[in-house]
Each structure stands twice: as structure tokens, then as C-alpha cells.
């Protein structure tokens, strides 16, 4: 599984800073939900598969902070749908190790 993830990320899975372009690329699978708040993603959907990849990226503390910061950027961009964005991990049955909320301190 890790080999597949390394190919998927172009070798960018390391400890340290995760680029928001990588996170945004995965979140693009959830773009309809992020923009409109529907349809709810279901486990096994492309959106939830992307969330699972983000879960694996966010396993280390440095990566978790980076993923968190990227999520906060998405929330800032789509503020009217912040609640929908915050529900993404739960709808997909995962926890990213931080609360997806506009007031979350990613440090």
C-alpha cells in the first residue's frame, strides 16, 4: 500500500511539510460536496478514498499540521460551506487527528 501511495504522490510522502497542492488534489475528488454541500460522500466513493489517502498522509505530527493548514485554507476559500467541509472525515468514517473547523489551531 505504501508503494502505491508513493507513486500516487510522486514521491512526496515524507515527514515534514506536505504541500497544499497535494492535499487540494485529493480534496478535488470531493469538489461537488465542498462547493454545494451535497451529495454526501459514502465510504468507497472517490471522495472517501481521497480522504483515506489524507488520513495516511496525516499520520505523522508534521504532516498532520500541514494537512490541517491546507484544510483551513479550503475552509477559508469556501467559508459558506465550512460545515460541509468539516463533516467530510466523519462521513467517510475516518479521523484526521484534528478537528476540521475554521477556529482550529493547527499548531
Image (tube, rainbow, N blue to C red):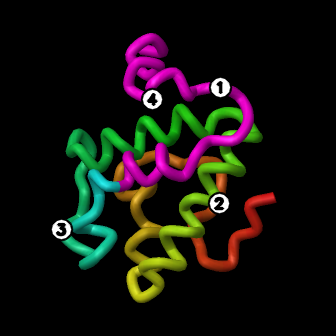
Q: Residues within 10 Å of mark 2 (few under 14, many from 20)?
A: many
Q: Quadrant of the C terminus?
A: bottom right
Secondary structure of the residue carrying numbered label 4: loop
| Magenta range | 1-27
Secondary structure of the residue carrying numbered label 2: helix
76 in relation to 1, above or below: below
Which mark's residue is nearer the viewer, 4 or 3?
A: 4
Q: Which residue is mark 4?
A: 9
Which mark's residue is nearer the viewer, 3 or 1?
A: 1
Earlier sequence position, callout 3 versus callout 1: 1
Q: Which residue is mark 2?
A: 69
Earlier sequence position, callout 4 versus callout 1: 4
What's the mark number on residue 14? 1
User: How far across and how far down the image is residue 38, in percent?
Assistant: 21, 72
For the point 45% across and 25% down, which residue is it? 10
Asked if labels 4 and 2 touch by Cβ distance under 8 angstroms, the answer is: no
What's the mark number on residue 39? 3
> Which of the 4 quarters of the picture holds residue 9?
top left
103 in relation to 88, above or below: below
Asked if labels 1 and 2 touch by Cβ distance under 8 angstroms, the answer is: no
- 44 in magenta: no
Amino acid at each position: 500500500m505504501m508503494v502505491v501511495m508513493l507513486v500516487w504522490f510522486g514521491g512526496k510522502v515524507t515527514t515534514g511539510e506536505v504541500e497544499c497542492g497535494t492535499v487540494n488534489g485529493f480534496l478535488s475528488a470531493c469538489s461537488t460536496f465542498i462547493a454545494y454541500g451535497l451529495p454526501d460522500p459514502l465510504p468507497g466513493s472517490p471522495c472517501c478514498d481521497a480522504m483515506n489517502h489524507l488520513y495516511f498522509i496525516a499520520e505523522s505530527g508534521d504532516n498532520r499540521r500541514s494537512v490541517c493548514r491546507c484544510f483551513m485554507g479550503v475552509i477559508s476559500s469556501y467559508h459558506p460551506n465550512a460545515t460541509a467541509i468539516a463533516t467530510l472525515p466523519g462521513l467517510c468514517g475516518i479521523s484526521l487527528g484534528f478537528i476540521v473547523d475554521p477556529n482550529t489551531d493547527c499548531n
